Image (tube, helix red, strand yellow):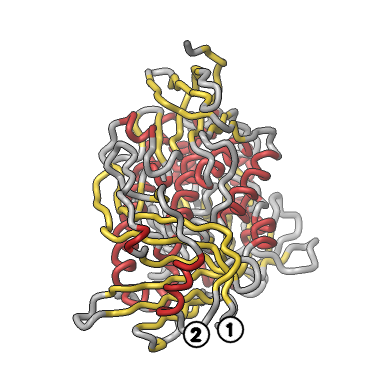
Amino acid sequence: MAHTEGHTDVLVAGAGPVGLTAAAELRRRGVECRLVDRLPARLPYAKAVGIQPRTLELWDRTGLVRAVLDAAVPMRGQLTYVNGVEQPRLDLKLPPEVPYGFAALPQNETERILEEFLNRFGTGIERNRELVSFTQDADGVTSRLVDVVTGAQEEVRSRFLVGCDGAHSVVRKGLGLAFEGGAFPEEYMLADVEVDWDLPYGYGVRAMHRDAGGAVDDVLVCIPLPGVRRYRVSMLVPAELSSVPGKGGDGVAHGLEGGRVPQLSHIQAVLDRMSPQPTLASTLRWSSVFRISHRIVDRYSDGRVFVAGDAAHIHPPTGAQGMNTGIQDAWNLAWKLALVVGGAARPALLGSYDAERRPVGAEVVGRTVRHAAEGVQADPADPATTMMREAQLLVRYRGSPIVGRSEPGGAASPRPGDRAPDCGGLVSAIATYPLRLYDLLRDRDHVLVLYLAGPDTGAMTELGALAGDFPAGRLGLCAVLADGVASDGAPVPVYRDDRGEFARLYGVRESTVFVVRPDGHLGARIALPAGKALVSHLEGILGT
């Protein structure tokens, strides 16, 4: 018999990186939530290991990034070999204004850092708690949880439910969402090992063998991990370890499989035939057999219930897109939920989650399937664009129902819905060192960034009054002044664009106000006088 334990604002099911992100961002914004997971403890596995620059930018926004930088290792590029012949080296280079590069960190370490961050807000993971069913009505969601140890049942009433419960998601099934796609026939091995080769530090390795017809019939992929010559390696599974795919009752063959576990000898056999240098594997920390599917849901939400991460989209691990895409799903949803729960926005705001994130998921699924077969080097875009896309810096929400119309600007100028680029060389009257724009955005929600090409105290006063009309903390404001514009007595915080980087990267010559969203995307770009257009945009998001 289930007993009711009361009410919470949001129930989050699944405490992997995606669920931890959702819970942490909700709690950081003052929303009451519970985070449940059926596992008794964090799994010590290096499954998803790549950290994209865009994810690091989001963690910068919260002050979490330093812990990640302390624990991760740089991903500098990829060495590729085909039938033993070295191909052109791929260097992971980004424009100098991008504040973070690519990194690698075992998933269990990512989860540890996120969990410790969540704990700062007085919330922890409720272990051995499995969501088994739910129903929703006009006012909320009633979920049934089961203690997997004792069998005790509990009913939880919440205003919203977020399913971050993986490829075999109970939440997705409960909503009856379509999960269309297919599966790769191959099985793979994953392992966390050390090797004694002397290949360049920080480079991944992709070695392939092509048969006489050009088809890839053998592959070895190695991603560096923290430690001395430590890698997460993946490769085709040998016949003796092949297993019947586990489908979780939903026909989805994706993720780690049960059955026989690869031994060090299995890993060594692949290294012997595929490694670019003779090498000996040792220190096997973990290994598993896994399968890959590619699927995406037909919608990311239904009423008061949402899905994110693997519950919404699964695909090959090529380019480390999966976990990062899921983390960004959770971030996109969390700031919107927080506004609605806090009464600072209408529930209609939540409809933009599906509108913004499902196209991203569909693009990632399609691209990773192509890259799994051909490699990232086969991308038809120019190398610089390919690298920015892999870094997830080209994610755009143009056309979203909550971003403003595009204002005139250069062809390369960021438009509403685009990522707000970072820039350096911002000088204040107090700090004796140059600041970056992201320093001004850290630990804030919506921020008005006013660029002034000439003196305009009236615009600063007007926008200061506008920001003050919104609840405390909902709308920040700062001014960036073109070099030479006077700032004495300014009624808002001001920074001088000392090197002209802001003007260059934002493609702006005239006085303009930019609305930067909590997720670091531009909500609007409006030339002065902003007036009614700015008020209308803000009320469309923050209005109640």
Instruction: Kindly identify the residue that appears in the image at 33 percent across and 52 percent down.
Output: 243
Is 328 drawn above or below residue 75 in the view shown?
above
**Can residue 12 be seen in this snapshot?**
yes
Amino acid type at image mark 1: Asp
Residue type at mark 2 is Gln
Seen as rendered, the residue at the extreme left is: 213
Relative to residue 163, is residue 240 depicted above or below? below
Instruction: Relative to 248, say whether 523 is above or below.
Output: below
Q: Residues within 10 Å of mark 1 (few under 14, many from 20)?
A: few
Residue 98 appears in the rendering: no
**Residue 138 located left or right of residue 463:** left
Instruction: Name the residue beneath numbered marker 2.
Output: 277
Instruction: Please give the count of numbered marks on the rendered protein.
Output: 2
* Residue bearing mark 1: 198
Left or right of 136? Residue 535 is: right
- In what element is the residue under mark 2? loop
Residue 378 got which mark? Answer: none
Cβ atoms at labels 2 and 1 below 8 Å apart = yes
In the rendering, at what x and y percent does residue 9 appear?
A: 54, 25
Residue 208 horizontal/vertical position (percent):
35, 77
